[in-house]
Amino acid sequence: MSTEEVQTTQLSNGLTCDLPASSPLAKLLKSQRTWVGPDAKKRATILRGAKSIAIVGASPNPSRSSYFVGTYLLQSTDYRVYFVNPNADTILGQKAYPDLASLPEVPDIVDVFRKASDIPAVIEDVLAIGATTVWVQLGIWNEEAAVYAESQGLTIVMDRCLKVEHARFNGGLNLMGFDTGVISSRRAGR
């Protein structure tokens, strides 16, 4: 009789249990997220405090989400926006930079449109230039990279669209059919 490897798993209620490592439940629980990023208030503070944003993985293709986010940022905010793509000369009429180190300034936020396995390398580039905030776009998740980034003093947001969050905090989710239902006499922030 062979002894199967057992893993101790912490459940969301705080209790732990031992499961065979090869069991479907163990695999499911291992895939669940445990890292929690900044809450809504902190994300709003990040966006309101920023003056510049670099979009890593920006695309000149209008059907890509990075293009849509870049368009929104250029048209609806006063951020200085930089596009980072080593395979493009210009994006949305702006110069594209081959890497973060080539930017004319250290951006306040590095918005990342790269696959999850590329996030650790982007974090290393962010650390090398001295930026402080990494914003990983909706649908992209690398928990180990997030934990590492925080251990290096970075603020990191993952699996959230910067455009949607910006519009959400400024009552502007009415663009392209989104409607927040917010009615306010307050002047919208950036």
Image: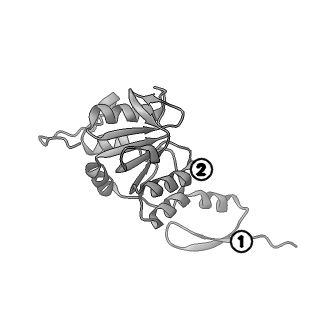
Quarter of image, res 131: bottom left
Return the mark for residue 22. none
Circle 2: element type: helix
The relative height of residue 61 versus residue 49 in the rendered view (above or below) is above
Sequence-wise, the earlier of marks 2 and 1 is 1
Q: Is the residue under label 1 in contact with that under label 2 (CB below 8 Å)?
A: no
At 46% from the left edge and 65% from the top edge, which residue is drawn? 152
Between residues 164 and 29, which one lies in front from this camera angle? 164
Between residues 79 and 161, which one lies in front from this camera angle? 79
Asked if residue 46 can be seen in this view, the reply is yes
Tell me if residue 188 comes above or below residue 38 in the rendering.
Answer: above
**Image position, residue 141 (x, y; %):** 52, 51
Give the residue pinned by disc 1.
Answer: 6
Applied colour scheme: one colour
Q: Quadrant of the N terminus?
A: bottom right
Which corner quadrant holds the C terminus?
top left
Nearer the observer, 48 or 129: 129
Q: Residue at x 32, y 45 (%)?
A: 52
Give x and y (percent) for residue 142. 54, 54
Q: Is residue 137 visible?
A: no
Quadrant of residue 74 within the rendered picture: top left
103 displayed left or right of 4: left
- The residue located at (20%, 43%) in the rendering is 189
Q: Kindly give the residue lying farthest to the left in the view shown.
A: 185
Residue visible at 59% across and 50% down in the picture? 117
The amino acid marked with disc number 1 is Val
Q: For the residue marked with disc 2, what is the amino acid?
A: Ser
User: Between tags 2 and 1, which lies in front?
Assistant: 2
Q: Position of residue 105 (x, y in %)?
A: 36, 47
Disc 2 from disc 1: Cα separation:
27 Å
**Which mark, residue 117?**
2
User: Which residue occupies the extreme right position in the image?
Assistant: 1
